[in-house]
Image (tube, coloured by chain):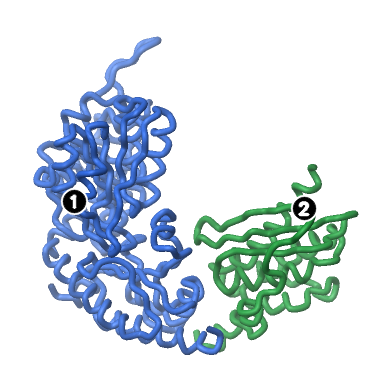
Chain colours: A blue, B green
Amino acid sequence: MDINAVRNEFPILHQEVNGHPLVYLDSSATSQKPIKVIEKLDEYYRGYNSNVHRGVHTLGTRATDEYEGAREKVRRFINASSTQEVIFTRGTTTAINTVASSYGRANLKEGDEIVITPMEHHSNIIPWQQVAKETGAVLKYMPLQANGTINLEDARETITKNTKIVATMHVSNVLGTINPIKELASIAHENDAVMLVDGAQSAPHMKIDVQDLDADFYAFSGHKMCGPTGIGVLYGKKALLKDMEPAEFGGEMIDFVNWYDSTWKDLPWKFEAGTPIIAGAVGLGAAIDFLNEVGLDEIKKHEQKLAAYAQDRMQQVEGMTIYGPKERAGLVTFNLSDVHPHDLATVLDAEGIAVRAGHHCAQPLMRWLEVSATARASFYLYNTEEEIDKLVEGLQTTKEYFGDVF
Amino acid sequence: MSFNNLDTLYRQVIMDHYKNPRNRGAIEGDHMTVDMNNPTCGDRIQLQLQVEDNLVKDAKFDGEGCSISMSSASMMTQAIKGKPVEKALKMSELFSELMQGNDVDTDELDLGDIEALQGVSKFPARIKCATLAWKAMEKGVDEEKQD
């Protein structure tokens, strides 16, 4: 992978922030966009903006082809067996909410169990809390090991014959833990439960094969994988999706509408009520082309190198606490002595370095870690070891700056 | 941006309030409690107020957060203690103006140490940290009025 060539694809990276070259280490929150994605959006709006699936005119046909073409790109990207299994959503959150409110409401009853983990993002906790309240199902957490990983023995004990849904993230946005999805799915299936995977932090960074993982549902967001905001994907096995009721109703998703009753379109469209996110989907298609050109295996290798380098360098800073296992995805969550993460992030920002500070939409995990907040540096294909050096320098500066206070 | 700019944010008096918070703890006797947090960043404050005859008799806080939110809470309790409720609210209004970077007549009200937080206005991402304690106070006084 030619890192300079990759960086040249991202116009936003070539700017100064507060008098320093931008060091963007917040890709887990959202990734930057390559020029090909930006141009694709521009081309769509300038050239063939039109509604899909309805007009007989030329622009409408082109928009529909591009929109459905993007769906096929997503299908290949995650190796789904059919485009009927690929539903465009607003993002991971909407995708998980769709499963919770449609599949969850229809299949959960009092005494049934939903099993999640303490490391989940709020988007994979709250939809289950809500559906548990509505149906009388029980929300259960499988325990974590001290280093923030899942032990399969613990999973086997938590997932029981009463479990109907197991929902976990593939990669933790805080700990960087890469969860054993295939094994968890197999344990879920042994107990006749379905497996939902929050792939927001995995799909951008590694090859995903939903059939090999045997995930029943897989959700991810476009904006974290070089695509636009406002577009995401819900993959679901056709056998499950076909029996599920839509979560939203209106235009685009209907077959026949009678006075008091209506019927739905086939998959995947019955889950896409209203004018869909056409530009977003087209942009996501361009993002997938871009990622494929660079190569997901190359990207993963690059990020793992950065994660290892960052851990080594950051550990040398006195007062450093790093959370999560050593083997991890491309992010490092940490605290520096008693410096509050917000103060730390402000000092780094003054040096042009963008990191995330706060609870990372994982308040239960913060409680598990016994901290109120943490700072996080997250990497993507365009980050470099030199940028990590600058981060480490910035952390030293932070210590010096607050040195007489703490 | 150099350290000079950071110094406009992290003034000595702010760090002093952070390190040695005034009025941190709980009020014994009659009081009301307000819990408030900043859901975007996780900062959290519990403010206790003792209001009698329209006067803030006592104010104490506890919580978790960055130097700006905690020092602001410390300064706020110091500033409103012994003041009429109306004056405390007026100070809060003035403080919001100050945070927006607007010119305010600071002579009008005795802000004391609070003026040190003026630099926060140049760091838009941190304004909510500084106003958290004041919002909690407003909420508390509002609830008191409704009782």
Q: In the displayed orientation, state which residue is furthest to the top.
A: A259
Looking at the image, residue A233 lies above or below residue B73? above
Q: Nearer the viewer, residue A18 or A396?
A: A396
Identify the disc placed on residue B141.
2
Contact between marks 1 and 2 (CB within 8 A): the answer is: no
Q: Is residue A207 visible?
A: yes
Looking at the image, residue A157 lies above or below residue B73? above
Tag 1 subunit: A
How far apart are the alpha carbons under marks 1 and 2? 52 Å
Name the residue: 26% across, 64% down: A34
Co-location on one chain, circles 1 and 2: no
In the image, taking residue A41 as reference, residue A405 lies left or right, namely right
Q: Nearer the viewer, mark 1 or mark 2?
A: 1
Name the residue: 70% across, 62% down: B26
For disc 1, the marked residue is A152
The percent position of residue A365, horizontal first and vertical second, equals 39, 57
Tag 2 subunit: B
- Looking at the rendered structure, the secondary structure element under dot 2 is helix
* Circle 2: residue type: Val
Quarter occupied by residue A194: top left
Looking at the image, residue B72 lies above or below residue A222? below
